[in-house]
Image: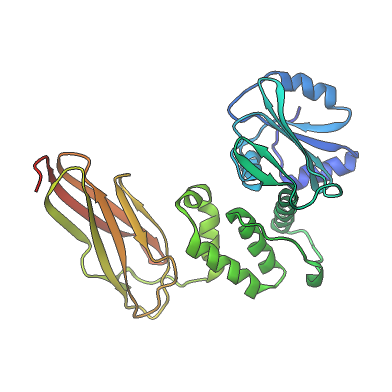
Amino acid sequence: MSDLNCNLISIVDLGNQQHKRSLLFFSGSEKPDYFDEFAKRMSNSFMCYKDDPFLRKIFEKIFGFNINIPVCVVLSGDSISHIVAYSKGKILQECDVNEKYCKTSDSFQIGNKVVLKKDINNTFRKKLFLERISEDETLEVNKSDISFVIMSSFYNRYLAACLFQYIGLYDDANVILNKLWQEFTPKETELYKEELVDVMERIRKLPIISNDSVKFEDMSYDFGLVSSKCELSHSFLFENISSHKMLISDITTSCGCTLVSWNKDVINPGQVDSVVVVLKTNQIGFIMKDVSIICNTEYMIKLRISATVTDVEF
């Protein structure tokens, strides 16, 4: 059983050259020994590969769920033909992903996650296509022949936007990219950090502006003496006084007790906007938290909030 130390293109192409299907094994949180023997038995029919964190991450995004139990994925050409999930050495769920016999409404379920079969191969082929682009291979694409369903998940729409940009359908790509940027959820922020940065860069190539061009009314705020176990909110008002557009790509805080919200759309020259910071007073005494704004300025913008928390109620 070989390690998955190659990309999707290599796995697919090697399988085609050997006239074999490829069997990819992802172990999840379990580390079963029986798959080595299983792979030996299957080696005459399959190209067999062991777990690899990078490729597992790709398939988790394609499937839309985390692989926490042993899963085998069978590739046939440029398609996923089977997905088999195991638990304690026994088959828990087997899915035949075969477009000839399944309709778009056909689905399979692992745990409480329902996945449409046809969605999987649509996403897989787009991912494979994008890897070929990144390998700088020559691809001839007839725009009129591009026809596929854009699924609702973030990663599927992201892949579709990348594909549209590559084949020159820029307006279609921008519609998807703008929606992705404006509507992403906290969970997607956690799962797709790299993709969100790429989305921001693809929307517009924004010029770097000086930090002095983002004029804040105040860059620190002290709530003073406050009661414990309450939520305090402050809006840091600012104006983009540069002659260029501004875009906040991310805001990080020094503690989980500090929450932030901000405008995820482009901030035009002369526009006034705000960053809203919410502090939860979960400890007694003086507290001070930093807020770091990542945007198209020369340096990260730093804000600070503080409070003196007492157990006396006001």
Query: Is residue 25 shown above or below 78?
Result: above
Residue at 70% over, 20% down: 89
Count of numbered labels shown in the rendering: 0
Q: Residue at x 53, y 53 (%)?
A: 194
Image location (x, y in percent) of residue 71: 69, 32
Residue toward you, 240 or 147:
147
At x 52%, y 71%, the residue is 205
Q: Position of residue 257 (x, y in %)?
A: 29, 45
Residue 156: name its quadrant.
bottom right
Q: Quadrant of the N terminus?
A: top right
Residue 164, compared with residue 134, is above or below; it is below
Image vertical order of residue 7 relative to residue 132, above or below: above
Q: Is residue 167 left or right of residue 193?
A: right
Describe residue 225's horizontal placement relative to residue 290 as left or right. left
242 left or right of 231 in image: right
Q: Residue at x 15, y 50 (%)?
A: 307
Q: How is the image coloured?
A: rainbow
Q: Position of residue 149 (x, y in %)?
A: 72, 60
Camera-side residue: 54 or 45? 45
Extreme-right residue of the structure: 19
Which sits in the foreground, 167 or 153? 153
- Residue 153 in picture, x, y percent from top left: 60, 54
Q: Nearer the viewer, residue 75 or 232?
A: 232
